[in-house]
Structures are given as C-alpha cells and as structure tokens.
Amino acid sequence: MQEEGTGGKVPRSLLLGTDMVENQKQIAQFSPKDAQAFPRYEEFMNRLVSAVDPLLDTVPVDMVAFQCGSLLQRLKSLSTLKPLLQAGLTLGAQLPQYYQVLTAPITKVLDQWFESEPLKATLATDAVIGAMTSPHTPGSGYVLLHHVMGGLEGTPGAWGYVQGGMGALSDAIANSATAHGASIFTEKTVAKVQVNSGGRVQGVVLQDGTEVRSKVVLSNASPQITFLKLTPQEWLPEEFVGRISQLDTQSPVTKINVAIDRLPNFLAMPNAPGGQPLPHHQCSIHLNCEDTCLLHQAFQDAMDGLPSHRPMIELCIPSSLDPTLAPPGCHVVSLFTQYTPYALAGGKAWDEQERNAYADKVFDCIEAYAPGFKSSVVGRDILTPPDLERIFGLPGGHVPGPALLRSPLASAFQLPLPPPWPVSLWKWGPSRKKHYLVLRHPHNSRRRRHGSSWTQCSPCSLWGPQEYVTLNQL
C-alpha cells in the first residue's frame, strides 16, 4: 500500500484470509474499532448469502399467471413464491438493512460498518470488479454480494484455480463428454439455429452449409448472439428481443496475461530468501486500492473516455499454487485491470500503441509496489474490451456477461415470456444469474510448460451428440 507521510517506513499491507483472528490483527493496524466490527460484518453478509443464493437457481415468479391466468394457473404459480418467503424468513427483522445492501452504493453500506479507508476500499473492490461502476453507484452493493456467494470444495466464498491451467477444464469437459458418447468438433462456426414450421428446434446449420440435426440445442454463446443472430426472429416475442437488445454489456476490463522469470518482490512483504511463494503470492492481490476515492476517480476517467490514470489492479499468480504452469523459477501472472472504456475519447482506436501505452502504465503502477517487476517480464498479452469481444465473442468485452447491477429479489419477479418460442432451445452460461467466472488465455489457446520453454496448445470446443447440440463460444 502506498501511503504519504510514512517517513520512509516499510509500507503496510492488509492480508485477509479464512482465519478471523489473523484478519482482525491485520485490520487493527488501521483501526482497532474496525477489527472488532469485522466478525459482525462477516456474519451479517453470510446470512444474506444464505438467503439470496438459493434464489439464483429458482424459477422467477410467474406474474402473467398471477395477473391474467385462470384460477388453477394462479394457484399453481403460488409455489414460485416459496423461495422468496423462505428468503424473507432467513433475513428476519433485518430485511430493511439487507435491502440496502442490494440497492445502495457500497460506500454507504461500508461506511455504516467501518472507518478505515484501506479496509473499506479492499472490500469495495469486489463491488466494482468487472463492472463499469463506481463504489458510489447505487446497486454496487449487490456486485459485492455476488462475488462472495458460492464456494469451493465446501468452503463458502472460496475461489480457486484449475490445476493444469484453464485448458485443463476444457479437456475435462471433453473427456467426460466423449466418455458418454458425445462427438466433438472444433473450428465449426454455427450460422443459425433451425426451427421447423411447428416452432420446434431441429438442429443447427454450420457456416459451410452442413446441417446438424438434433432434438435439443443448448447455447453457451452470449444472449445477443444466441437470440439476435442465430435464432430466427419470427419465433421470438418482440418484447423479449427488445430486452435482449438492451442488455448492458459495458466492460471496464483490460485483461493482461504476463509471463515472468521470478516472483514479484513487494516492498510491504519481501520475498523469502529461497524465492519460494509466500501466502500473499497465493492470494488475489489488489493494487491502487488504498481508498474508495481512488476507485471512483479511476471510474470517472473511463466515463470521460480515458483509460484510468491510476487503474485498479487485481493481480493473481496461479503458478504460485500450480508450478506446472511455468518453467522452474518462472511464473504466470493474471492482471484483471480497470477502468478502460470500450470506445476511447476523440475517436481514438485501441491500436497497438494505445494497448501498449496502457499496459506500460499498469506495469509502472506494479513497479511502485514491487520494484523489479518490469525487468522480470518475459512476455505479455493485452486484451482490451474490443479484443475480448472480437476474440471471445463477449459483447462489449464484458467478462461476466450482462451487467450485474440488479437485485436478485427483483430478478425473482421477472415477467415470464409467452409463446411463440422455439421449443428445445436453451440458453445457459454467463447470462444466467449465477456466474461461474472462468478466464482463459487469449487466441483460443493456453500456455503450458514444456521443458524450459513456453509453448501453446489449443483447447477443445464442445458439441453434443445427436440428441443434444451444445454451442460453445470459445
């Protein structure tokens, strides 16, 4: 952490993990009062998670049936209220405070709990990461909640890396699919979804004219591509098409993948003599996050059409946990940076010069925290929002899918759409309310260690057997 007026002292840092006692010791550096409040805050948020998480996988309340359906339809639709009632019972008398978390700016929520800016800014990063929003934006509280839901291997709120790199995930899916009789094809672009005269999906047509027949089509492409480009529009309700067209896909993220020949050596937490990874190397490291004003200013720069002068940086080192990702002594670094607008001010394009200028700025920032970082860089890939859109098919370059600034309680009352509807066309993936954030290396490739050099290997895209066709956008 960069602080003024420290008189040459060793910079401070804030390391948070699963040990509450250690967390309190870390927070007490900045505020003993906040250290005492932190367990209560965690308990408060955990209760909200337990109430909201089940809602993300429930069918929305059928408002059409309530308003216009027959008596039998209205009675049947009452069952969709049960998850909402259960959530209300879980939250109890504190429902108004929880509602504020889902709708208010995260700064307003955190100001009620804490006084120290380093802690508030650290927590606020999860309220803005991946979203074109400021900590002062109403609804940013839900983005924080979204990122603390879920878990890993029984540990609530935990995140993890795929052993062997993200390509190993594609391999695992492919192996499982083929073991169950699936056929896998790569480099096969889908031109459209076929719908017969009765409104039933009957397969897809490839760009080369090949027809692939199936009873069910599952699409993991974006909702815009699935419903606005691949699906015949005459089978979609006009209201639905309008809502898909209006999805907010503004992305603030430029992703930078870096290969380095040694671990970053942070001033606040120097490396071990042997160079082995320390606990902080195995965390999600947030830089330029000393206070929420910095985060807001970085956002404001993007609103003016400029890359942030002092970008928010999330730095992860997957190879600190999985040494198979890099040659001995080397590492891979994943930089999730923001804010960078999709369209630059003055009509400028994200050309090579602009990409490198921004990446150099990010590296200069890291250098201030970890001197020697820039000289350790072996190579880098820079992916701006237009690059993420072009390479991965993510509209606007938005990594999690459509913007997260919405309340799950509001989503529970989405208006179900009436027919006509292509039967057996299903959309799944990042446009769903529960997101599984998976980042892959650029150019449809993954880096793998081979001897002492870097090589590239192509992952698999997945198609289903004749009963099911799965469209994956890779």
Image (spheres, rainbow, N blue to C red):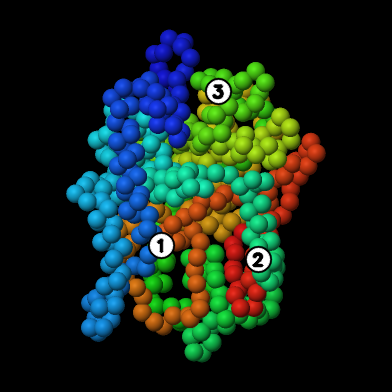
Residue 78: x and y in percent read 26, 73
- In the visual, does 9 lie left or right of 46? right
Q: Is residue 404 above or below residue 234?
A: above
Q: Earlier in the sequence, mark 1 or mark 3?
A: 1
Q: Is residue 271 above or below residue 452?
A: above
Q: What is the three-letter code of the residue carrying label 2?
A: Ala
Q: Please, which residue is most extreme toward the bottom here?
A: 197
Looking at the image, which is closer to me, 111 or 244? 111
- In the visual, does 298 lie left or right of 188? left
Q: Which mark is residue 266?
A: 3
- The residue wearing badge 1 is 57
Real-space Cα separation, disc 2 to disc 1, in angstroms = 24 Å
Which image quarter: residue 414? bottom left
Real-space Cα separation, disc 2 to disc 3, in angstroms = 44 Å
Q: Which type of secondary structure does the marked residue at label 3 adopt?
A: loop
Residue 92: x and y in percent read 22, 51
Query: Who's the residue at 64% across and 42% down the image?
Result: 381
Residue 7: x and y in percent read 43, 9
Looking at the image, which is closer to me, 413 or 128? 413
Looking at the image, which is closer to me, 348 or 146? 146
Q: Please, which residue is most extreme toward the top here?
A: 7
Looking at the image, which is closer to me, 72 or 193? 72
Badge 3 crowding class, 10 Å Cα cut-off, few under 14, some 14 to 19, many 20 or more, is many
Badge 2 crowding class, 10 Å Cα cut-off, few under 14, some 14 to 19, many 20 or more, is some
Q: What is the three-letter code of the residue carrying label 1?
A: Asp
- In the visual, does 213 lie left or right of 151? right
Q: Is residue 133 above or below residue 86?
A: above
Query: Who's the residue at 63% across and 54% down the image?
Result: 169
- The residue wearing badge 2 is 177
Query: Who's the residue at 52% across and 34% down the image?
Result: 283
